Every structure is written in C-alpha cells, then in structure tokens.
Amino acid sequence: MGKPSVNNAFTLLEGLFVLLIISLLTLVTIFRPVSSSLKLFGNQILSYCVFTQEKAFMDKEQKNVEIKTDHAIFDKIRFDFPHSITCDPFTYHYNAKGNISQAHTIHCQNEQDSISLVFQLGSGRVRIE
C-alpha cells in the first residue's frame, strides 16, 4: 500500500493572484491623491480641537486655541502644519464647560485644493467642509 501524496503547495495561479493583490494595494498607497493629505490634515486639526475641548471640560478651566497661518497651539501644544498647507488665523477658547467662545470658519489650502473648518458656537463642534 502506497502512502497518499500530500499536496500542501500553492498553485502558480494562487501565487500570481496574491502578487496581484499586493501590487494593487501598493499602488493605491503610493499614488494617493494630494487632496487626501489635506483631508488628513483637517482630521488632525479636528482631533486636536476635540482633545482640547475635552481637556477644558475635565479640568474645569479655560483652554486657549490659536490657529496661525503655519502652525496651531492647542493649550500649549504646538502643531506645525506641513509646508504646503496654510490656514486663516483664528483665536478662540473653550470654557470650563467645554463650550467654544466664538463661531468662525477658517479656510486651509495647499497648492491644489482647499477645505473649510467650521467652528459652531455653543457646544464647540468642529466640522470639515
């Protein structure tokens, strides 16, 4: 009685299919549109704003935010913008209840695209448009 042969290897077709998927994923990550970097930047600013708002609420004290053309300061935490991105200056604060002091819309742009960050009065919500 012969021992049955065990075939534990991948076929050539399966190997090529895996290489195709890896190649496509690599191309997608390398050739991202530039506007996605601006959206990523907007999400980073949004995260810093929410963090500062939560910190003001938890510490029960006012926290200042200064957005300049090339950097922002969130309660003494400096965030430098990428060199290609500039924003309109804006200064506000979150009070001890986490509410924002004034409503405003700032525009941030790079060479190809622009986004708007909308600060809503009261609850201090920030959204990207």
Image: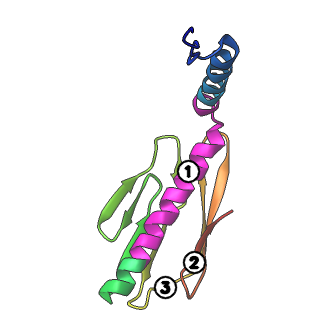
The residue positioned 43% from the left and 82% from the top of the image is: 94
Q: Examine the rendered structure and indicate whether residue 3 appears above or below residue 117.
A: above
Along the line of sight, the residue nearer the viewer: 91 or 12: 12
Q: Which label number is shown at residue 101?
A: 3
Q: Residue 118, how many percent across, how many down?
A: 62, 70
- CA neighbours of label 1 inside 10 A, class few (<14), some (14 to 19), many (20+): few
- Disc 1 versus disc 3: distance between alpha carbons? 26 Å
Residue occupying the point 52% across, 65% down: 46
As drawn, is 71 to the left or to the right of 8?
A: left
Q: Amino acid at mark 1?
A: Leu
Q: Which residues are magenta?
A: 28-53
For the C terminus, the image quarter is: bottom right
Residue 55 seen anywhere in this rendered image of the structure: yes
Q: Secondary structure at mark 1?
A: helix
Q: Nearer the viewer, residue 6 or 15?
A: 6
Q: Position of residue 73 (x, y in %)?
A: 37, 64
Q: Quadrant of residue 71?
A: bottom left
Corner quadrant of residue 35: top right
Q: CA distance from mark 1 to mark 2?
A: 18 Å
Instruction: Please state if 40 lies on the left or on the right of 63 as rendered.
Output: right
On the question of residue 62 being in view, the answer is no
Image quadrant in which you'd find residue 33: top right
Residue type highlighted by circle 3? Ser
Pointer 1 and pointer 2: residues touching (CB < 8 Å)?
Answer: no
Name the residue that disc number 1 marks: 40
- Callout 2: SS: loop
Along the viewing direction, whichever of 70 and 14 lies nearer the viewer = 14
Percent x, y of residue 105: 62, 69
